[in-house]
Image (tube, grey):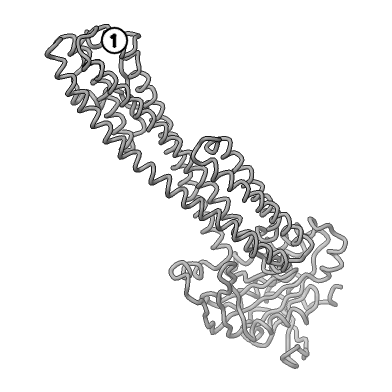
Amino acid sequence: MPQSPDHHADETTPRPNILVRSIAGLSVSIRLKLLSAFLGVTLLMAGLAWIGLETLRQANDRTERLLRDQARIAFFNDQYLYLSDLVTLATAIAIDPNDVQRQNASGFFINTSFLLIEGTNNLVLHTGQGLRTIGRAGLPDNAEISAQRASAKRLQEIARRAGSLRESKDYKSAGAIARQTFLPIALRMQRGAYSKVQDIEAEMAETAKSTALAYEASREMVIASALVAIGLAFLLGYAISGSLIWPVRRIGRTLNAIAGGRFDVRVTVPNRDELGDLARNVNATSQRLGELYAKVEAQRAELATEHARSERLLRNLLPEQIAARLKDDPTRTIADSLPLVAILFADIAGFTPRAAKMTPEEIVNFLNGIFSAFDELAERHGLEKIKTIGDSYMVAAGAPVACDDPVHRVAEMALDMLDVAQTFAGGVDIRIGLHAGPAVAGVIGHQKLFYDVWGETVNIASRMESHGEPGRIQATKPVRDQLAGRYGFVPRGQVQVDGVGPMQTWWLTGRLGDTGPQAEAPSRPRT
């Protein structure tokens, strides 16, 4: 609820008497009131009226100028944000979408050309709107916004040409156009928008300062002139001056309250003249500033929401402990030596012929469904999902921090994955490989961060999967030794492993004591 209009004024300003209210409430201009009241008494009183009107006009002009400057700042701030997005997109346009998909990165970098073209289209529309509002002919921003609109159209043409090259998979040429032609224009426009905002804010500060000085000077002039006039016509002079000074003070105090951030205050005067109009303008200004302040607060809340969204995205991209270390020191290198990690690799058998019979949407939905189910299993067993490559899936136990019995965790995950895979339509056969040992883990990249695990342990686990059979879990000796007595194993014999040589491996058949099919010796592998 807006505060009472008299709340802050009546503490120091006495209420006007009936005569003052009657004169103030006459539907006659201040000039006519003064001429009718004094009718040639002195030119001083006419000068007082002129000074009052000029002061009020200047105050009203400054108030309107502040509103225009707010709109100008909003326009150039929005333009700066548009250009920031375009700079990011232009920087990423040379990235191969296949590389993005292989690294399981955001679709933002896959649709770069579309987003860049749409961004430049929006920038052209934005500058066009600026020409129709704050950049009309005769206004101070007309020439600059016209030049920016021409630059925006130039960016639009370049974006279409770079997007066409990217769509034709000529990423190198698209990147070259973006770096050599698009980015210099965009960065120049961005700097121009930033400098313009700084200039407008400086102008607003100067306007506010001059408004306060003008108000103080005009008030002193009106009071001095009124005191001189009292000697000529005390009663009538008191009534006329009161009908002017009282509302001016109320409006001035209201303006001071608005300058202090109290946008809910309103002023009410009985005047049916220019002061009444000014009071209504002040109230409208207060309401508009309140709305703008609420919009700023809403945008601040949106920024907080975006920050929280970024935090969630960071937690999805990186393990929580790694994300916390990067936030503490973004420049540090994350590289950890892990004494014991258990690695699980899984691959969908026969995926290539299956995918050949599916539409792109069906392929994505199929992989999303099965990998989402695997993600739930990884969270249930306390494993860290490392990455997916095509139809391959990799998780680790004991990374990024050590855990109890990591080999047991990946074994449980592997058995559950076989069960979950059979719940999909037609059944899905997967090959799974397990291995455990030391490894190195860390974060790669500066813009698209990626947490990964390396070492012979990872390579052997990958070979266990690639040399495995559909519907089976192949494990190495370290895995078998640590799980002996709790899980069933069937020797496979020696397997020639690429890069390693012959290795003795086992089929993990199930948990000892289970009566389900996984506890039995495996039959011939499914094909």
Identify whether 360 is placed above or below 332. above
The residue depicted at 75 percent of the width and 83 percent of the height is: 490
Closest to the observer: 223 or 435?
223
Point out residue 324 in the picture as x, y percentages from the top left corner: 47, 67
Q: Amino acid at mark 1?
A: Lys
In this rendering, does residue 484 appear at all? no
Name the image quarter holding residue 347: bottom right
The residue depicted at 22 percent of the width and 23 percent of the height is: 222
Secondary element under disc 1, as helix, strand or loop, is helix
Within-10-Å neighbours for mark 1: few <14, some 14–19, many 20+: some
The residue furthest bottom is 501
464 with respect to 318 (left or right): right
Point out residue 475 in the picture as x, y percentages from the top left corner: 70, 82
Which part of the image, by quadrant, shows the C terminus? Answer: bottom right
In this rendering, does residue 514 appear at all? yes
Residue at the disc numbered 1:
33
Count of marks, rendered view: 1
Which part of the image, by quadrant, shows the N terminus? Answer: top left
Name the image quarter holding residue 111: bottom right
Identify whether 501 is placed above or below 201. below
Closest to the observer: 273 or 441?
273
